[in-house]
Image: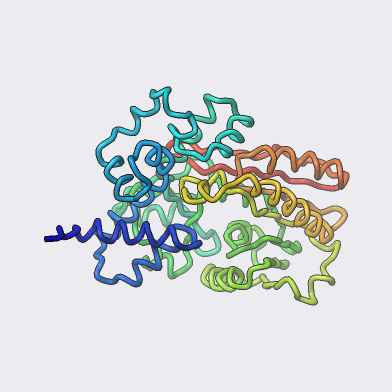
Amino acid sequence: MTQKIPFRDYHLFSLLEAYDRQTLPLDLFISHYFREHSSLGSKDRGFLAETIYALIRWKGLLEYLAPSSSWQEKYIVYQTTDLSKMQAREDIPLHARVSFPSHLFELFEECYGVEKAVNLCLINNTTAPTTIRVNRIKTTRDSLFKRWEGQYKISHTRYSSEGIIFHKKINFFSLPEFKEGLFEVQDEGSQLLAQLVRPKPGDQVLDYCAGSGGKTLAFAPHMEHRGQIYLHDIRPFALQEAKKRLKRAGIQNSQILLPNSPQLSKLKKKMNWILVDAPCTGTGTLRRNPDMKWKFDETVLPRLIGQQRTIFEKALSFLHPEGHIVYGTCSMLNAENQNQLEHFIKTYSLEVEGEIFQTIPAQGEMDGFFGVVLKRA
């Protein structure tokens, strides 16, 4: 007689095996799976999500220790092994001990040295904090904090004046405060990167790689509904999401620009501020996207470096002679950050204004970001 697989284990292995056969990001795939399996209760979903993220984070070490490559075997190892004790096992390759692909670990080592690279990899195998940014167009941090203080375990962010940290995960999108547009979910580091864009009321601003508009939502209150923000991206579906978020936030001085928009040519050399939130390896956000490290190979970085340079050059053509352009990534690699900055300064006769912004993930703190404000020399 065949032994019946426990309900949660059945869905755990079904989900993991199905994930291996497709290309969606992990969070999106899990979300789709949960929608298709309505029999899963909230506690089941919580267990599955937490366990799957842990298994993906530690996949490299689990594969090394497991007798076979099946998820069932890896799960048994995960349940029966103290993974922290494996850090002292010198017979295990160092990149496997910290559960990172060898090539990506070598890049961290080149940037930070062995000891710091090991620490960064281990930090990236932990859970990131859950942070929101208050929408100053509609409320204040103090007001929202008082509204939530008795209901949730929360605290102020250390560096961003607009952030609140939730110490226990909740369904933000069902909250009336979210539907009212009083806040957005945004990491503190992302908030600080967006604050490098400092437009005055009446300025012309271009968010060149806008995606779903997260950074625009953060800097738009500076403009007090005056001037114009243009959101551009090559992904129409992302801009559609941005449109909804802008409406919910009460931002009225914005326009969506698709790549083939005839209006683009009229904006050349007119922007007071440009944000280039460039596509990158995402190595600063691996706590939230642990599957990304396993998709990283030796072709990824050179391709992205080329894309970043092309995008920056195109965006720069919209800059007013006295304007500012912000280059930012959620990467921790020098090749995408300091090296690109040197290239932009030398190639386009630019100079840095203010301090270079960079954050490195630490336990319970913000993600890794890089940002710099540039102007014509």
User: Which quadrant would the N terminus be assigned to in this image?
Assistant: bottom left
6 on left or right of 231: left
Residue 104 shows up from this direction = yes
Question: What residue appears at the point 65 percent right and 40 percent down from the top-left corner?
Answer: 357
Question: What residue appears at the point 50 percent right and 50 percent down from the top-left corner?
Answer: 187
Question: What residue appears at the point 80 percent right and 42 percent down from the top-left corner?
Answer: 343
Image vertical order of residue 253 relative to residue 51, above or below: below
Q: Where is residue 41, by image quadrant?
A: bottom left
Image vertical order of residue 75 relative to residue 243, above or below: above
How far from the left and from the top, in percent, is residue 92?
Answer: 43, 28
286 on left or right of 80: right
Name the one closer to the observer, 59 or 118.
59
State the count of labels: 0
Image vertical order of residue 353 relative to residue 288, above or below: above
How far from the left and from the top, in percent, is residue 175?
Answer: 37, 65
How far from the left and from the top, in percent, is residue 123?
Answer: 45, 36
Residue 54 shows up from this direction = no
293 on left or right of 345: left
How far from the left and from the top, in percent, is residue 336?
Answer: 68, 43
User: Which quadrant would the C terminus be assigned to in this image?
Assistant: top right
Name the one closer to the observer, 141 or 36.
36
Q: Where is residue 252, by image quadrant?
A: bottom right
The residue furthest left is 1
Name the one closer to the observer, 136 or 15.
15
Question: What residue appears at the point 64 percent right and 63 percent down from the top-left corner?
Answer: 224
Q: How is the image coloured?
A: rainbow
